[in-house]
Image (cartoon, helix red, strand yellow):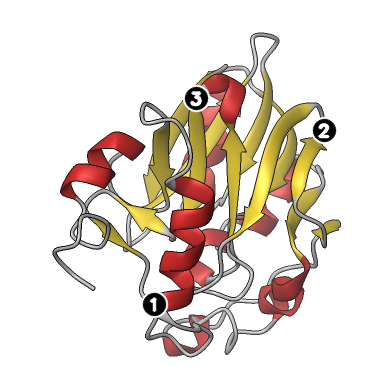
Amino acid sequence: MIVYKIPTGLLSENVYFVVKDNKDTLIFDPGAQPEDLLAFIQEHDLNPVAIALTHAHYDHIGALDEVRNVYPVPVYMHHIEKDFLSNPVLNLSSRHEPLSVREADVLFKEMGEVSIEGFDCRIEHVPGHSPGSTVYLFEKDGFAIVGDTLFKGGCGRTDLPSSSSHAELMEGINKHLMTLPDNTVILSGHGDQTTIQQERVTNPYLNGVTR
């Protein structure tokens, strides 16, 4: 599989395209700039089969309806945040330009091994930044799409209205991400990619510098 990244919007939210050899494509977090996303799909002759959300803050769902208007594929997400899609207060867009999008098609209630329209991975619940934050672990392929849980040199904010606590976030990161092989590539919702090994050594929230 190949993974493409397109940063979008004022917050440079990373949209990921996970592409199989046959061009079947799983799209993660279509946050903004739908015209650019659609053009990328067409230029690379991709065949979208599903959209998956790591969480439902506005910067991760802003282009959702525009993409599925053209490609009517199912949307997958954690059930806890199902109401975020249509509620500007919950998805935090009320602070800026209110955003409401259509409901998801598949709501995850159980974690573990899943198949998303033929894409096999393991999903785990890592709340803290948002109540339904979900990481998608493609362990056979050596990468993980983690949304706003873990970043290169940092971790997700937990001071937002729907956040819980930094302690809960770190508990989930340590349980579900830091137990992955050191060479696992971490693809975050913002910023550059990193690896588990690099974060273990350099991330101040993981190496003991910051608590």
Q: Residue at x 51, y 38 (%)?
A: 144
Q: Is residue 195 visible?
A: no
Q: Mark 3 to mark 1: distance in Å?
A: 27 Å
Label 3 neighbour load within 10 Å: few <14, some 14-19, many 20+: some
Q: Is residue 112 visible?
A: yes
Q: Mark 1 to mark 2: distance in Å?
A: 33 Å
Which quadrant of the rendered structure holds the C terminus? bottom left
- How far across and down, in percent of the image, does residue 100 sit? 66, 76
> Which numbered disc, 3 or 1, marks the residue that appears first in the sequence?
3
Give the residue number, with chain letter if any, for mark 3. Answer: 142
Q: Amino acid at mark 1?
A: His
CB-based contact (under 8 Å), mark 2 and mark 3:
no
Horizontally, residue 10 falls left or right of residue 4, namely: left
> Which numbered disc, 2 or 3, marks the residue that appears first in the sequence?
2
Q: Quadrant of residue 195?
A: top left
Q: Quadrant of residue 22?
A: top right
Query: Furthest-right residue in view?
Result: 105
- How far across and down, in percent of the image, does residue 61 sit? 58, 61
Q: Amino acid at mark 2?
A: Glu
Give above or below for 163 relative to 52. below
Label 1 neighbour load within 10 Å: few <14, some 14-19, many 20+: some
SS under mark 1: helix
Which of these two is toward me, 6 or 114? 114
Label at residue 166: 1
Which of these two is toward me, 104 or 34? 104
- How far across and down, in percent of the image, does residue 208 sit? 19, 62
Horizontally, residue 87 falls left or right of residue 183, namely: right
- How far across and down, in percent of the image, does residue 70 sit? 73, 42
Give the residue number, with chain letter if any, for mark 2. Answer: 117
CB-based contact (under 8 Å), mark 1 and mark 2:
no
> Which numbered disc, 1 or 2, marks the residue that appears first in the sequence?
2
Q: Mark 2 to mark 3: distance in Å?
A: 20 Å
